[in-house]
Amino acid sequence: MGGINTSSFNATVLSIATDINNNVYAAGLFTNEIFPSGNNYVAKWDGTSWNELGGNKTSTFNSWINSIITDKTGYVYAAGNFTKGSSYNIYYYVAKYTQTLPVKLSSISAAQENKDIAIKWHTSTELNTSHFIVQHSTDGSSFTDIGTVPATGRANGYSFIDNQPTNGTNYYRLKSVDKDGATSFSKVVSASLTTYDSRLTTFPNPTKDVVTVKGNHIASVEVIDNAGRIIKVITLKDATNPILSVSGLQAGLYHLRIQTSDGKVSAVGMVKQ
């Protein structure tokens, strides 16, 4: 596994184990391209190559591993002789390996697809991962949840469609949640929407009591009378098709000044009966 007939990357393998995700672990004395002599650690086969758990190919944090096992949740346990920190003293005990993150992403991207934006990501490791929360932002710093995708529990490819993106630049990130409640965040990716129809409309028009503003990511609405005076200000948060009460307005013609989360402003007319 992981080599050809001429490679001798393993010196001595003392124990092997598999986990619930069909990953293979091997404990023993290993060789690699940096050290010609055997390094003592646990290696994980990811389907393509062997990698040292918890470090890199230059670390030799374990002195001697005699046996390894995994439990039903996927955690790895190793028994043997250990060194601790910079000490050269040998400690005899069982160690438990827990990942610092519930999932490891190999890639994440966002791209426009017609009037939508597709967010796609691939995982190379999932240990007790419960689900992914897709978050959206218009400024790259303040994010809101827009969807949840269940985790498969194994390395996999995922996708999510944002069918209500903002006209302009949209920012996305993933919040990965494991079964114990631990969370981690992906890097931020972005996609620009250039063909989205940002025109806003209202209905019914004329209206008596309420009016619906047809549009996405609406941040605020100012109601302006025919003399140019601001009668009412409604503050929203990234709203979609908000329904506004106009029952307290006198009959007449009004203008709605609508600002979206990306800072763009539109104006539409409304007749109050």
Image (cartoon, grey):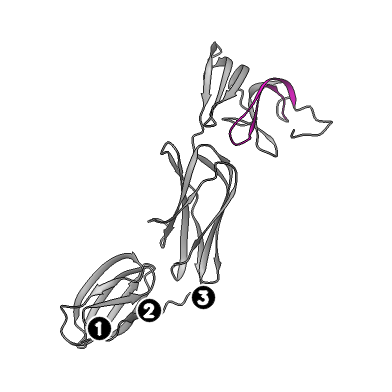
Q: Quadrant of the C terminus?
A: bottom left
Q: Secondary structure at mark 2?
A: loop
Residue 268 sits in quarter = bottom left
Measure how far apart labels 2 and 1 are at the Cα level. 17 Å
Region rendered in magenta: 10-32
Q: Quadrant of the N terminus?
A: top right
In this view, the residue in front, 226 or 155, is 155
Task: Specify whether residue 86 is in view.
Answer: no
Neighbor class of circle 1 (other Cα within 10 Å; few <14, some 14-19, many 20+) is some
Q: Residue at x 15, y 84 (%)?
A: 250
Neighbor class of circle 3 (other Cα within 10 Å; few <14, some 14-19, many 20+) is few
Measure how far apart labels 3 and 2 are at the Cα level. 15 Å
Above or below 105: residue 79 = above
Task: Specify whether residue 133 is in view.
Answer: yes
Name the residue that disc number 3 marks.
195
Name the residue that disc number 2 marks.
200
**Residue 36: percent from the left, percent from the top?**
74, 24
Q: Nearer the viewer, mark 3 or mark 2?
A: 2
Name the residue that disc number 1 marks.
207
Q: Main secondary structure of the magenta part?
A: strand
Q: Is residue 19 magenta?
A: yes
Q: Residue at x 51, y 75 (%)?
A: 195
The image's mark for residue 15 is: none
Label pair 3/2, CB-CB below 8 angstroms: no
Q: Secondary structure at mark 3?
A: loop
Q: Residue at x 84, y 31 (%)?
A: 6
Q: Is residue 147 magenta?
A: no
Q: Amino acid at mark 1?
A: Thr
Label whose residue precedes the other's in the sequence (3 or 1): 3
Above or below 64: residue 176 = below
**Residue 233: percent from the left, percent from the top?**
22, 72
